[in-house]
Image (cartoon, rainbow, N blue to C red):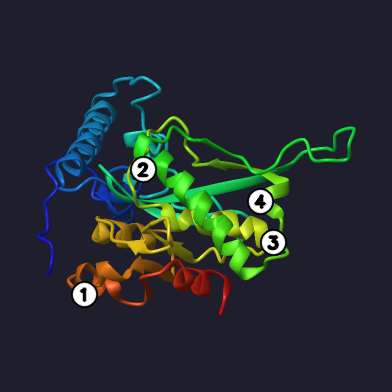
């Protein structure tokens, strides 16, 4: 649908405009919440500052450094948008650009008040030295950080048990979890996180460490896992799919019980995405590490 045209008032420079790239940047980096109220506020802020600059130049008034025009052009684009609305609130859709991801790191998907967002699960192994008897000083413990809520902390313990059980099935000779302490972290530690939707991501991150196999950077997953490895349904599928598209994800693993939620999404959200449904963690493992 064609947008309505607008007319410039008298004595306003003919070149004054807000480019489409500026509006797209506003939506992506400043105004991710549902609705357009905050977007309207940002646009109003831009037009007020432009009006001030036009009047100031016409009357020869001197503006503060913050309000003065920095560029020669009267066009607001994505390149100079920060001069009118400040630094972006959101700076990146991906914490890791490298493909594959470093071992022990997997992208999950989370629902937030701003819609969906990427939720990385990071794990690191800590191998202790030997004591005087030649035995390891540590191993077999899990430490978590990242301001997780009680529900998410319980998910980490379940995921740890599932990961140990799956490793025993995959490679009975692998004693990684017995010899190594695991530190699991969810980045952006200042942001509280909770909810039961990262179980499969946590299991995959720990198995990536234990098997020394990296995960593709264009793979994301969401779903809770039971103690026996069942993949349980989660909410916010629409928001999480939008977050995955924004981050350039090509393959998403969803719980089988969320198939109907996926089917109800509009085609423009589903287009180009490879969706893998899982009812048991073994299916998630096949997608993440290859059959």
Viewport quadrant of the C terminus: bottom right
- Mark 2 nearby-residue class (10 Å; few <14, some 14–19, many ≥20): many
Q: Determine the secondary structure under disc 4.
A: helix
For marks 3 and 4, the one nearer the N-term is: 4
For marks 1 and 3, the one nearer the N-term is: 3
Q: Is residue 192 visible?
A: yes
Name the disc covering residue 177, or none.
4
Image coords of residue 178 (percent x, y): 69, 49
Alpha carbon separation for disc pair 2 and 3: 44 Å
Image coords of residue 118 (percent x, y): 41, 52
Q: Are marks 1 and 3 in contact (CB under 8 Å)?
A: no
Q: Is residue 260 above or below residue 234?
A: below
User: Which circle, 1 or 3, is nearer the viewer?
Assistant: 3
The answer to which quarter of the image holds residue 200 is bottom left
Q: Are marks 2 and 4 in contact (CB under 8 Å)?
A: no
Q: Residue at x 9, y 60 (%)?
A: 4
**Which residue is identified by label 1?**
263
Alpha carbon separation for disc pair 3 and 4: 12 Å
For marks 2 and 3, the one nearer the N-term is: 2
Alpha carbon separation for disc pair 1 and 3: 35 Å
Q: Determine the secondary structure under disc 2.
A: loop
Q: Determine the secondary structure under disc 3.
A: loop
Give the left or right position of residue 97, taking residue 256 as reference.
Answer: right
**Which residue is identified by label 3?**
212
Alpha carbon separation for disc pair 2 and 4: 49 Å
Alpha carbon separation for disc pair 2 and 1: 38 Å
Observer-nearest residue: 170 or 36? 170
**Which residue is identified by label 2?**
81
Residue furthest front as drawn: 133
Observer-nearest residue: 273 or 149? 149
User: Which circle, 2 or 4, is nearer the viewer?
Assistant: 4
Q: Is residue 92 above or below residue 171?
A: above
């Amino acid at each position: 649908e064609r947008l309505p045209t607008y007319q410039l008032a008298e004595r306003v420079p003919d070149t004054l405009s807000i480019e489409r790239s500026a509006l797209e940047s506003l939506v992506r980096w400043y105004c991710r919440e549902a609705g357009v109220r905050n977007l309207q506020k940002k646009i109003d802020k831009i037009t007020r500052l432009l009006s001030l600059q036009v009047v100031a130049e016409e009357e020869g008034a001197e503006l503060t450094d913050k309000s003065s025009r920095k560029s020669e052009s009267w066009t607001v684009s994505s390149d100079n948008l920060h001069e009118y609305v400040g630094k972006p609130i959101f700076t990146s859709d991906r914490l890791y650009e490298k493909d594959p991801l470093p071992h022990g790191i997997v992208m999950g998907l989370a629902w937030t008040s701003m819609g969906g967002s990427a939720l990385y699960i990071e794990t690191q192994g800590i191998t202790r030295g030997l004591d005087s008897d030649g035995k390891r000083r540590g191993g077999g413990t899990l430490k978590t950080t990242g301001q997780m809520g009680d529900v998410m902390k319980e998910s980490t313990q379940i995921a740890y048990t599932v990961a140990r059980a799956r490793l025993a099935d995959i490679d009975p000779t692998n004693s990684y979890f017995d010899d190594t302490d695991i530190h699991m972290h969810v980045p952006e530690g200042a942001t509280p996180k909770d909810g039961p939707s990262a179980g499969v991501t946590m299991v995959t991150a720990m198995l990536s460490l234990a098997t020394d196999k990296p995960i593709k950077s264009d793979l994301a997953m969401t779903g809770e896992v039971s103690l026996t490895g069942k993949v349980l349904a989660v909410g916010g599928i629409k928001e999480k799919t939008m977050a995955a598209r924004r981050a350039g994800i090509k393959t998403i693993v969803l719980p089988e019980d969320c198939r109907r939620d996926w089917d109800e999404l509009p085609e423009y959200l589903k287009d180009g995405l490879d969706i893998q449904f899982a009812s048991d963690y073994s299916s998630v493992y096949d997608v993440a590490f290859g059959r």
